Amino acid sequence: MKSVKALSFEPDSSAARFRLSFGLMAAIWILGLVGHFTFLLEWPALALYVLGSIGLVLWRGKKNGEWTEMYLAGGDLRKSLLWGLIGGLLLLLFAMMNTAMMKNQNSAAMMSGMRYLLVNCSLIYLFPVLILAEEFLWRGIMFAAMVERGFNKHLTVFLTTLFFFINHFAVAPVGIMERFFLALMAIPLGIINGYIAVNTRNVWGCVLLHMIVMTSMMVAIRFIL
């Protein structure tokens, strides 16, 4: 009931989501830095990233009914999916052109770590869960809370894209060159998905775009490079 939500013990839910999203990001980065110097590497940080992001969304959604505030419900779903499809196809075309230019032994060696994780360790099947976690954190919790708290939308797109970029160095359990490659991919993803989120107030087009791009990357790693 709407009246129940109005009587919540947490009158400013956007402030809580803002603090929680930045606190989770800080915890992930610290855990990744510490883990890098142990035999565990970045795996604990990656686990916190996935479980923390999805868990935080589910908790806030079930506790306070903040699905709309986190862009998981409401907004313009149709427009979000349409823009996500168009953006995903454009990035897919760019990725195909880039893969064709990179098709050589050096490129294959550069992505050997990702190939090992995706193919040899069969982690390719877990990528849909990772994509949900990423979009829930960056666009669903953090982005939405920043916009709700009055941040300029362009600044919000820039900052969340920057954090998304940096995060790949904190959680990717691969070599530095592969992390840099993944982080570069995060820039157009963060920008396009940021504007989809702010203009549609719905995160599912961002998920669709992310799925298309990541699928193209996995196909390239699995069958081409």
Image (tube, grey):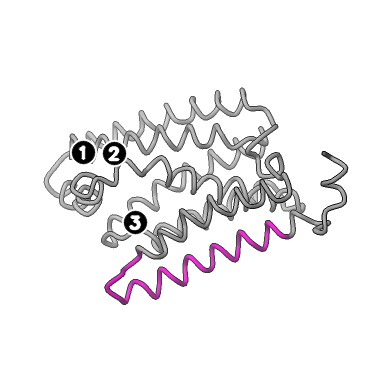
Q: Secondary structure at mark 2?
A: helix
Q: Tell me the quarter of the picture where residue 70 sits.
A: top right
Position of residue 3 measured from the top left corner of the image (x, y, whole percent):
88, 42
Nearest-to-viewer mark from 3 and 1: 1
Q: Main secondary structure of the magenta part?
A: helix
Residue identified by numbered label 3: 180
Q: In what quadrant of the picture does the C terminus appear?
A: top left
Location of residue 85 with respect to 24 vertically, above or below: above
Nearest-to-viewer mark from 2 and 3: 2
Q: Is residue 156 left or right of residue 164?
A: right
Please rate how many residues cluster around mark 3, counting C-alpha atoms within 10 Å: few if below 14, some from 14 to 19, many from 20: some
Amino acid type, residue under disc 3 in the picture: Phe
Residue span colored magenta: 16-42
Q: Residue furthest left?
A: 105
Residue 218 image label: 2
Q: Are marks 2 and 1 in contact (CB under 8 Å)?
A: yes
Location of residue 63 with respect to 88 vertically, above or below: below
Position of residue 197 measured from the top left corner of the image (x, y, whole percent):
62, 38
User: Magenta stretch: residue 185 in it?
Assistant: no
**Residue drawn at point x = 43 percent, y = 44 percent:** 129
User: Count the marks: how many?
Assistant: 3
Q: Is residue 130 left or right of residue 59?
A: left
Position of residue 196 measured from the top left corner of the image (x, y, whole percent):
59, 35
Amino acid type, residue under disc 2 in the picture: Met
Residue identified by numbered label 1: 222
Closer to us: 116 or 225 = 116
Q: Secondary structure at mark 1?
A: helix
**Residue drawn at point x = 59 percent, y = 54 percent:** 56
**Residue drawn at point x = 55 percent, y = 46 percent:** 136
Amino acid type, residue under disc 1 in the picture: Arg
Whole-angstrom CA distance, mark 3 to mark 1, is: 19 Å
Q: Tell me the quarter of the picture where residue 194 sits.
A: top right
